[in-house]
Image (spheres, helix red, strand yellow):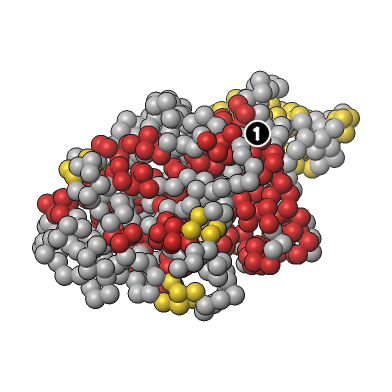
Amino acid sequence: MRRTSLRGVTVATVATALVIGSPLVAQAATTYPSDSTPPNLISLLNGYDQYWTSTGTNNLHGTVDDGATLAKNDELTSWINQHATKAQQFTALQDAEYNNATNTAYDQSFTVSQGLGDVLGKLFVKGRLDGSLPLTNALINSSNGTSGAYVGTGAAKAHFSYPRPYLPSDPAATLPAGDDQVNCNPATVNASSLAANRTGKAWADAKGNLTITRVPATTDTTHEFSPNDVVLDAGYGQKGICTGGSYPSGHTTTAYQAGITLATLVPELAPEILARTSEAGNDRIVLGVHYPLDIMGGRIDGEAALATRWSDTQYRTQVLEPARAELVKYLEAQCGGTLASCIAAEKPYTDDPYGGQAMPGGTAQVVTDRASAVSVYHERLTYGFARTGVAGQAPSVPAGASNLLLTAFPTLTDAQRTAVLAQTEIDSGYPLDQTGSANGSWERLDLAAATSATVAIQADGSAKVLSTGGTATVVSGVLTAPQGTTVQAGSAIALRGTGLAAGATLQVVLHSDPVTVGTLTVGADGTATGSVTIPAGTAAGSHTLDLVDASEASVLVSPLGITVTAAASGSGTTGGSGTTGGSGTAGAAGTVPVGVHLPVVSG
């Protein structure tokens, strides 16, 4: 039989690789330093060893080392599988798809583009299909893209060799009709090593079989990602799925490679793209073919992979940056405006995976806007697992991770971008955390928070994260209290702002409950001086003052900490106003919610 080749790889090889969620190794015409230095996934993922020890023979058997963590893994998997809406099940089947050798289907590099919004997402797909985005396509696709398929998970799956959720714990179970009765035979292909840890649990039956419902195959006739009808099948009964280890998720690995790639190409929508990418990973649990720990591992894979690519100067300048230029130019030409105006006019990415039902120990993970997208991404970093390590350790940002913020914060130094990641990462001690190791902790990175941060550059050049959930913004304004930061409620406090936009009239907002207490007008030199009165009813204690623009949407300075003492008897509550400063230049401003301040993570 004649075989058609794809960059020297046979169609038979394509089919085998993609069904188990392992992309082909990308083969580019030009070689780059990072081609030969992909991250070692087994080393990055070995935090799993404290929960499970495989037999070392890739037979899906082993020893449970942390029954409580693996039980939580089971509970969440069963709940997600049982509570996903019909619409989410269909999306999950779409996210399970890999393109074929004739390019008549699609893969996660198409589906995660929904994070671009209802207009730009469709334009992205159109450009991929009609040949308008050749550089982007060669970079991002999940089958053989140089970043989208940079690393595969075959070796890691074989090393950890953990059985998938839908496999029976009972070796005497009967396979459904249509399954591969030889290669998926429960007598050998089973989760019997987990039976004792499952028996008696609410999410398993009397023989320890996890409660999982298979999502039936269907045909995608929407033509949303392909002009063709595409058969969607989770592949439960196929050898590559039933015998392939569950940890880490190969589909999630490729989803994050594509999703993080797209987020770095269009950082203006990075939080939404990352949230949609997390949905693609979560959809593997919806289908019952993976657990939350598998998804967390796949995210780690994708982060490390893209950081390696962005850290390769030659690859960055010759592949990533040209693809970004191509994509932005195309999107703006197609939507007929600047990227910012196109984003403002479209409907953002949304999702409601469980019909409003809250997960055990979590939320309903509903996405309606940027803030909720960042929140849902954050929740899926840990899935509500209890800590299995030490809390409160110092930030542990892996080498090269800062390069994932190059397009979101092009004016920051490497040290400043690292500081942004350190201040937005989650606490230590959650499953798969490698804080303190040579690898650093990829598990702690919160890229959605980092790419939505407002960052103030301090007088000493250090970066301080003021808030998250808005637009990636760098501000250089400074607010001080020349006569001291202690003020009596009902009295005035003198203020001086520098590094501000010349001519602007800014509001002074008192926190924690936001109260506008006055205004300052900026002179031509970017400075503003004046005073505002702290309301007499303000509680004694620590507070902060912000300078915001007239819309109250942009925080322009690092918050000024003040101490309010008790009001004098009979004092009133009045506002104050400021006066102009001298002449000069303006500073930078951006858009973020007022009053959302992120504490710095420290040891």
| 454 relative to 337, above or below | above
| 391 relative to 273, above or below | above
Query: Which residue is nearer to you in this view: 125 or 598?
Result: 125
Query: Which residue is nearer to you in this view: 220 or 418?
Result: 220
Q: In the displayed image of the protein, which residue is found farthest to the front? A: 1
Q: Is residue 369 left or right of residue 95?
A: right
Quadrant occupied by the C terminus: top left
* Residue 86 in view of the camera: yes
Look at 22% across and 68% down and name the residue there. Answer: 181
What is the crowding at mark 1: few (fewer than 14 residues within 10 Å), some, or many (at least 20)?
Answer: some
Query: Which residue is nearer to you in this view: 296 or 503?
Result: 296
Look at 49% across and 74% down and name the residue there. Answer: 230
Q: Residue 214, located in which quarter of the rendered image?
A: bottom left
- Circle 1: residue type: Thr
Q: Is residue 475 left or right of residue 87?
A: right
| 90 relative to 363, above or below | below
Look at 44% across and 57% down and name the residue there. Answer: 13
Q: Is residue 89 left or right of residue 511?
A: left
Point out residue 482 in the picture as x, y percentages from the top left corner: 71, 22
SS label for mark 1:
helix
Point out residue 556 in the picture as x, y percentages from the top left corner: 70, 38
Point out residue 466 in the picture as x, y percentages from the top left corner: 59, 37
Point out residue 254 in the picture as x, y percentages from the top left corner: 48, 52
Q: Which residue is mark 1?
A: 313
